Amino acid sequence: MATRTYSSFRGASQKTQEAEKLLARYPRLNERELAWLIEIFPALPPIGKAVMAADERLSAKLAAFYRDHSEKLHLPAATLSLSLLLPIMVTSAALWWFLG
C-alpha cells in the first residue's frame, strides 16, 4: 500500500513540501539542508505542522527536530505582533467605515 503525504493530497505550499522531505531524512541532513529547514520551519502554516505531527512517519523525527533546535524555531516578535495587529486594525477600520 502506497502512502501519500498531506502535500500530495492538499497541494501544500512548496516550502511545506520541502520541509516534509527534509524532515523525512532528519537527522541525516547536511549543514545546508539543516539550515534551510530551520529557516523555513517557523513560517510554515500551522495546519502543515499539525499534519506532520500526526503523520506516523514524521512525528518522531519532528519531535527530535524540535528537541534539538527549538531555540531557533521561534518567529521574530515583529512578525508575530504584525500578524496579530494587522487583522485587528483592518477589522476596526471596516467597522468604523460601516458604522460611522
Image: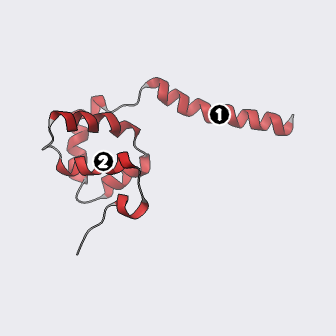
Q: Single out the residue that lies furthest toward the bottom.
A: 1
Q: Is residue 3 left or right of residue 90?
A: left
Name the amino acid type tagged 2: Glu
Q: Position of residue 6 (x, y in %)?
A: 36, 60
Q: Amino acid at mark 1?
A: Ile
- Label 2 sits on a secondary structure element that is helix
Residue under circle 1? Answer: 88
Task: Find residue 63 and report its image quarter.
Answer: top left
Disc 2 crowd rating (10 Å Cα; few below 14, some 14-19, many 20+) is some
Query: Number of labelled discs?
Result: 2
- Name the image quarter holding the C terminus: top right
Q: Earlier in the sequence, mark 2 or mark 1?
A: 2
Q: Nearer the viewer, residue 63 or 52?
A: 52
Residue plotted at (43% across, 51% down): 47
Residue plotted at (67% across, 31% down): 89
- Give the residue at x 70% y 37%: 91
Q: Is residue 79 left or right of residue 16?
A: right
Check the image and report above or below for 2 versus 99: below
What mark, if any, has residue 18 been given in the picture?
A: 2
Label 2 with label 1: CB-CB less than 8 Å: no
Q: Position of residue 13 (x, y in %)?
A: 41, 50
Image coords of residue 83 (percent x, y):
54, 33
Q: Residue at x 48, y 24 (%)?
A: 78
Quadrant housing residue 29: top left
Closer to us: 80 or 3 = 3
Frontmost of labels 2 and 1 is 2
> What percent of the width, then of the height, locates residue 79?
48, 28
Q: Quadrant of residue 72?
A: top left
How far apart marks 2 and 1 lie (CA) works out to 32 Å
Drawn side of residue 42 relative to residue 97, left or right: left
Query: What's the mark number on residue 53?
Result: none
